[in-house]
Amino acid sequence: MKRSSRSLNPRQIEAFRAVMVSGSITRAGKLLSVSQPAITRLIHDLEHDLGMPLFTRAGATVAPTPEARAFFGEVERYFVSTDRLREAAMIIREHSAGSLRIAAIPSLSASCMPDAVRDFSQKFPDILISIHTGASSEIIDHVAVGQADIGFVALPPGRTDLKFLPLPVTEVVCVMPLEHPLAAKEFVGPSDLHGQDYVALGPGSLMRLELHALLRAADSHPRLRVESLFSGTVAQYVNRGLGIAVIDPLAAVQVDTTRAAVRRFVPRIGYELSVVHAPSVGYSTMFDSLAASLTEHYLDVIGQVQDIIDKQMANLAGTEAGKRIDARF
């Protein structure tokens, strides 16, 4: 198929994208509010201009060729760029006071961030807030290249190109099914995990690396059952009885206390979060306000986890006292 030298028609690109997304010429026509023959003609012209087939046809069914799939990746990047330009114009038009792009790890997004954003929006009602959730490494890269204004992440070592404001340091905890034998203990250590079903964070997690160093030192070998990138997801697997986990307090507060127990982990593994921003951006009143509010709610969550531990230990002590009384009669 010979390639045409004329410029690509944006309407042809829209038609191609609509067919790829919808999987049908008919549905693509409905998405673009044009007839099926019009979509067919646009696709045919695009194939001619590109000099390559994009779809194979079997009656009313079309299937993308390998070339179409490769081309679709470039088309999507084009549409993402134009969508961002459109969103930027909308922000400028409707929010002259500006916007704030926040990126946070999932455990913060699911616990403290909604309250912190509510507090922030009450102080700065004309600011458009955009929130992205991702892994710490991804967020740090977004902040470094200017795709996010401020990030809330697990403190990374060795990054000198960004500025960090540490949040209060806390410590990880051990969570387990409520009826697990280790739930009878006041705290759990590395040797206690030997031979136990274990739910782990992903291999790249600093928390997992620190825990595994302690396990090696204690010659302790738990049975790995499940691993997951985010600690909040790990807590859900513990809720369902799949094993023991060592997680941060933000995830621990998501534990279902009717099904799982929370205990201190000894020796202590510190959990450090930071507010991160690019040096070129500088700190501002908005940043200070958001960081202060998030810190306040973060401390509240830490307090909630301690309350869970205290309450469960008190219930355990009461149960043990009751057993001793029953044994006397």
Image: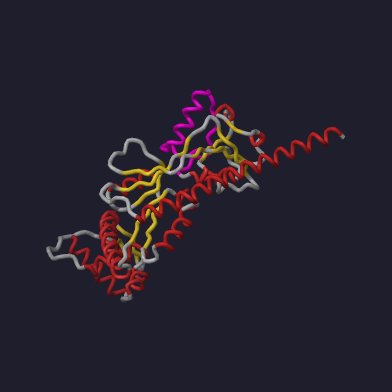
Question: Which residue extends farthest right?
Answer: 329
The picture quadrant where one finds residue 26 is bottom left
Left or right relative to 256: residue 329: right
Q: Is residue 268 above or below residue 92?
A: above
Is 281 displayed left or right of 324 in the figure? left
Name the one closer to the observer, 120 or 313.
Answer: 120
Q: Residue furthest front?
A: 285
Q: Is residue 69 left or right of residue 131?
A: left
Indicate the position of residue 274 as horizontal and vertical percent values: 40, 44
Q: Residue at x 13, y 65 (%)?
A: 6
Indicate whether 247 appears above or below 50: above
Residue 119 lies within the magenta run:
no
Pick the quarter of the image with the C terminus: top right
Whether residue 5 sits left or right of residue 22 in the image: it is: left
Q: Position of residue 129 (x, y in %)?
A: 38, 60
Residue 196, image quadrant? top right
Tally of numbered discs: 0
Q: Kindly identify the residue that appears in the image at 50 percent across and 52 percent down.
A: 111
What residue is shown at x 25% (from left), y 65% (from top)? 13
Q: Which residues are magenta?
A: 200-229
- Where the N terminus falls, by quadrant? bottom left
Given residues 215 and 11, the one toward you in this image is 215
Give how far across and how far down residue 133 sits, in percent.
Answer: 41, 52
Which residue corresponds to the image point at 78% horizontal and 36% vertical from the top-left? 323
